Image (cartoon, grey):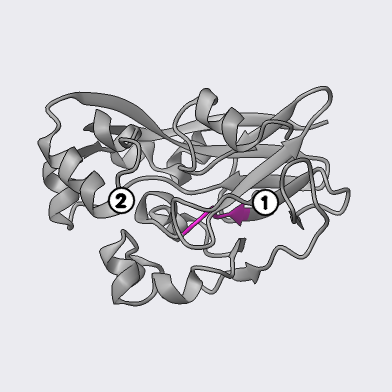
Amino acid sequence: MIRVTPISTGKCWLKSAQKCAGEGRNPFQRKIDIFRDKKWMCLEIFAWLIEHPEGRFIVDTGYLPWWNPFFTTQVSIRVAPHEEIGPRLCQMSLDPSTDISAVILTHYHHDHTGGLHHFPHTRIISPRDGWKESRGLKGKMMGCLPQRWPVWFRPELVEFDGPAVGPFPVSHPITKDGRIFMVPAPGHYVGHAAVVARGEGVTYFFSGDAGYTLTTCWRIAPTA
């Protein structure tokens, strides 16, 4: 049996233009649209707990830092210390240092890697594509903060070496039974991956910023 639990790690206020880009707008034009936009919206910052017969898995680790001017003027992040992923798991009677089999990162942006320090003894799985870029100047400009990652952070870099699944040409299994796996979801960041968990009669699709709504996720994975 597979059980999925959403874990709220705080709230994020952002411009509506960041949620949905104008058709045909490139990344630079989209940033301009965001600065011009006057409409704000609130989203919760989620990590996800997947409980599987082979163990417990966390998808992404939550929250954004304050340092970048874009994220201090165009995004408002409000995360209390007890809302971080580690304390949240402890509230669920789970010890993040011993009770989690693996953390799965969809990509390397800081709102997905900000809680890594809560998992010093845990296997961390992430896409190989994007790893090198995330540690350089371009990665920092695009929203990665390697200087704030734990000094011990050495993820298990994976490639999409598994079979096609539904509309996805390749995959990478996480569990031995193949019910949790990663698939490519390009567009948001280099090497961006989504995580799929197949339960009894339901399939869970964790898009990791490839889509903000059920509608966009359905377009990404219509048969997942």
Name the spot of residue 212 as percent of width and height, x first.
Answer: 44, 32
Q: Secondary structure at mark 1?
A: strand
Left or right: where does residue 212 sit relative to residue 121? left
> Residue 129, located in which quarter of the rendered image?
bottom right
Q: Is residue 109 above or below residue 217?
A: below
Label for residue 98? none
Disc 2 or disc 1, which is closer to the eye? 2
Neighbours of disc 2 within 10 Å: few (<14), some (14-19), many (20+): few
The front one of 50 and 165 is 165
Left or right: where does residue 3 sit relative to residue 90? right
Name the spot of residue 147 as percent of width and height, x first.
Answer: 31, 72
- Tell me which residue sits at (56%, 50%) in the image: 96
- Tell me which residue sits at (44%, 51%) in the image: 188
Q: Quadrant of the N terminus?
A: top right
Q: Is residue 123 above or below residue 89?
A: below
Q: Quadrant of the C terminus?
A: top right
- Tell me which residue sits at (43%, 56%) in the image: 113
Kindly tell me whether residue 122 is visible in this rendering: no
Q: Which residues are magenta?
A: 103-107
The front one of 133 and 28 is 28
Name the spot of residue 104 as percent of width and height, x first.
Answer: 60, 54
Left or right: where does residue 23 sit relative to residue 130? left
- Tell me which residue sits at (54%, 62%) in the image: 191
Task: Give the residue type that dot 1 points to.
Answer: Val
Q: Secondary structure at mark 2?
A: loop
Tell me whether the residue at label 2 lies in contact with that at label 1, contact meaning CB atoms closer than 8 angstroms. no
According to the picture, the residue beneath numbered tag 2 turns out to be 26
> Residue 155, located in which quarter of the rendered image?
bottom right
Name the spot of residue 107 as percent of width and height, x first.
Answer: 49, 57
Residue at the outermost right position: 177
According to the picture, the residue beneath numbered tag 1 turns out to be 183
